[in-house]
Structure formats: structure tokens, C-alpha cells
Image (cartoon, rainbow, N blue to C red):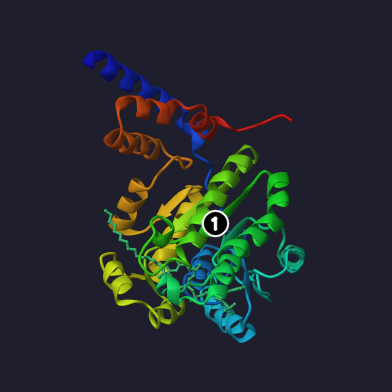
Amino acid sequence: MLLLVAAFLVAFVLLLYMVSPLISPKPLKLAGAHVVVTGGSSGIGKCIAIECFKQGAFITLVARDEAKLVQAKKEIEKHSVNDKQVVLCISVDVSKEYRQVENVIKQAQEKLGPVDMLVNCAGTSLSGKFEEIEIDRFARLMEVNYLGSVYPSRAVISTMKERRMGRIVFISSQAGQLGLFGYTAYSPTKFALRGLAESLQMEVKPYNVYVTVAYPPDTDTPGFTEENKSKPLETKLISETSSLCQADQVARVIVKDAVQGNFNSSVGSDGYMLSSLTCGMSPVTTITEGLQQVFQTAMKHEPAMYTIHLLHPTRMQTYYIRTIRL
Ligand SMILES: NC(=O)C1=CN([C@@H]2O[C@H](COP(=O)(O)OP(=O)(O)OC[C@H]3O[C@@H](n4cnc5c(N)ncnc54)[C@H](OP(=O)(O)O)[C@@H]3O)[C@@H](O)[C@H]2O)C=CC1
Ligand SMILES: CCCCCCCCCCCCCCCC(=O)[C@@H](N)CO
């Protein structure tokens, strides 16, 4: 019996390695690519823009405050690697009107060509006890963090599908992997991004478009400083168990994962553990990731469960879907 299980596992691992070229996308070339970064005027978004610019990309920064945009543009331009590179700034609130966001993307495409990579980094956080958070803030946070990622993505997706190439990145958070004291308004907006990303990835994979969800830990940014002003002591104590990162370090990891087309992107060893523990049935981009999900399930359930986890038709879709003829 044991032998049978072992043989089954070996056969399966072999099979997975055979299909591995099918599930690993070709890396995106950033040199000459057009990268749109919402929230690109500050913190993590600005560092993502710098990282892409350093690799030869053309950048469109999208945020509301024009002065901050101009300042960020100057900072990014210092890192140019050739004299053709451009940083374009467009001011818009990504969470209000879909048509406005669509126009901004149109303008960007007219100036710098079709979008090769969209990074949805515009977002805001708020911590506090459930009953102390002003009721309007729940809707506002959902608008900015969730709809503010839906709108730009929706505006670029058709062109990406037509061109059979592209990357869409969503910036969730470790607080989008587990709910924490103080994050009743914030966490759900970041969980929502994962649902969106998983669904969208399944739709666009046949068109060679890859989606990445990043789950950064606390990161030293202007947004983080702002959030700390109202942070309950409990939230601070819990958060201190995970590391505080620098924005450029987080940005490097996110850009690397997006370029490679990895679905999941996490930073550091606790980020890695958290992603393993909360892997669910997310799309996998590497064999190790797939096996890891299964062993994760195996530790939690009876053997039947991990067979289902591996072989369920839905999982098969995420392995195999390449082309659909409608
Ligand atoms: N810092 C952290 O600890 C972590 C942050 N994150 C997430 O990363 C993202 C960036 O965070 P961080 O760098 O700290 O944030 P910052 O506050 O430093 O920067 C936020 C950026 O988003 C823009 N922005 C905010 N709201 C809107 C809007 N409605 N429309 C257009 N642009 C907007 C801001 O510009 P402007 O205000 O001018 O519009 C700014 O460029 C957020 O989604 C955050 O939730 C995730 C995990 C950890
Ligand atoms: C075995 C696994 C160990 C992992 C321990 C994980 C502990 C969780 C700490 C979570 C910290 C909260 C991050 C929120 C960041 C964020 O989105 C805001 N800062 C935005 O500004």
C-alpha cells in the first residue's frame, strides 16, 4: 500500500515536471516596455517605477497630487539608462469614475504605446477598532483599494489580450492573507484583490497575460507613517512580529515576480511562510509551488484531500489552460 502511494507520488512529480514548460511563462523584457504604475508618486509604487526605469522601461505615473507626481518624476529620471526613456505623469483619482481612468490609459497609450505592465499600487490604509472607524471609511477604502485596481485593469485588459502579452500586478498586503486586530476596514479590501486576481488569471492565461498578487509586509513609506498615527497598540504589537521592510527592497521582489509571471509574490521568510500557509488553490507558476500547496494540504487533511487538491478539474485548468478556441 505504502509502495503504491510512493509510486503514485513519483509518477505525479514526473508528470508535473513534464508539464512544467506549459505553466512557466516567458519573462517580460522591461527594456523599452511601457509600465503604468498607479500610486507611483510615493512609497512602494515610486520604488517599483524606479526599479522598472533602471531596467530600461518607459513609465507612466498615475496619482492625484500633481506636485508629488512632478517630484517623483524628477527622482525617477535620475536612474535613466538611456536618453530615450520617458516618465509621463497623469493626475487622476483611480477610484471615482471608470471613464476618467479609461481616458488616462488612452492618453498614456497614445504617448508611450500599449501598456506592457500595469502595477496597481494606488491604495491607502487605515487601522482602528471596528466600532471606532467612521462608517464612511469602509466604503471609501473599498473604492480606493479595490475599485481603484479594477478600473485601470479593466482599461488595459482588452489590448493586452489582443496583443497576446502583458502583466497586471495587484498590491495586496500580508493583511490580505490573514485578518488582524485593527484592520477590519483595510483587510477586506486586500482580500478582495486576491479574489479578483485569481479569477482574472484564469481568464487571461490563454492570452499569455500574467497576473501577480503581491503581499508586502509593513514597509517604511509615507503611507505607513500616516497609518501609524491611529494604529491601536494591539495592532502595533502583532505587526512587530513580522519585519518592517524598505520600499526599494519590496519593489525589487515585486518587479522580479511580475517579470517572471509568478502569481504569488511575497517578501522575506515570514512572507514566504504566510504565503505557504494561506496558499488555498491559487494558480501556480512553478512546480515547487504546486507541490508545496499539495503538501500544505496534506498536513491539514486526509490523503484523499490532497489528491483532490492536485487533480481537481479546476486545478487542472490552472495547469493547462493555454488556448481556447471560442
Ligand atoms: N507601506 C506598507 O506597510 C504596505 C503597503 N501596502 C500597499 O501598498 C500600496 C502603496 O502603499 P504605500 O507605498 O505605503 O503608500 P503611500 O501612501 O506612500 O503612497 C500611495 C500612493 O497612492 C496614490 N493614491 C492614493 N489614493 C489614490 C487615488 N484614489 N487615486 C490615485 N492615486 C492614489 C498616492 O498619491 P496621491 O495621494 O497623490 O493620489 C501615492 O502615490 C497600498 O495599496 C498599500 O495598501 C501593502 C502592504 C504594506
Ligand atoms: C508562520 C508565519 C509567520 C508570519 C507572521 C505574520 C504576522 C502578521 C503580521 C502582519 C503585519 C501586517 C501587515 C500589514 C501591512 C499593511 O498593509 C499596512 N502597513 C499598510 O500600510
Residue 81 seen from this side: no
Q: In this view, does 19 lie to the left or right of 271?
A: right
State the image quarter where residue 324 is shown.
top right
Residue 325 seen from this side: yes
- Of 87 and 253, which appears nearest the observer? 253
Residue at screen point 69% across, 70% down: 96
State the image quarter where residue 35 is shown.
bottom right
Residue at screen point 28% across, 67% down: 238
Crowdedness near tag 1: few (<14), some (14–19) or many (≥20) residues, C-alpha within 10 Å: many
Q: Is residue 41 left or right of residue 243?
A: right
Determine whether the residue tagged by mark 1 lies in a helix, strand or loop. strand
Residue type at mark 1 is: Val
| Residue 79: x %, y % from top left | 51, 74
| Residue 29: x %, y % from top left | 56, 53
| Residue 70: x %, y % from top left | 61, 83
Residue where numbered disc 1 is placed? 169
The N terminus, quarter of image: top left
- Seen in the picture, residue 114 relative to 130 is either above or below; the reply is above
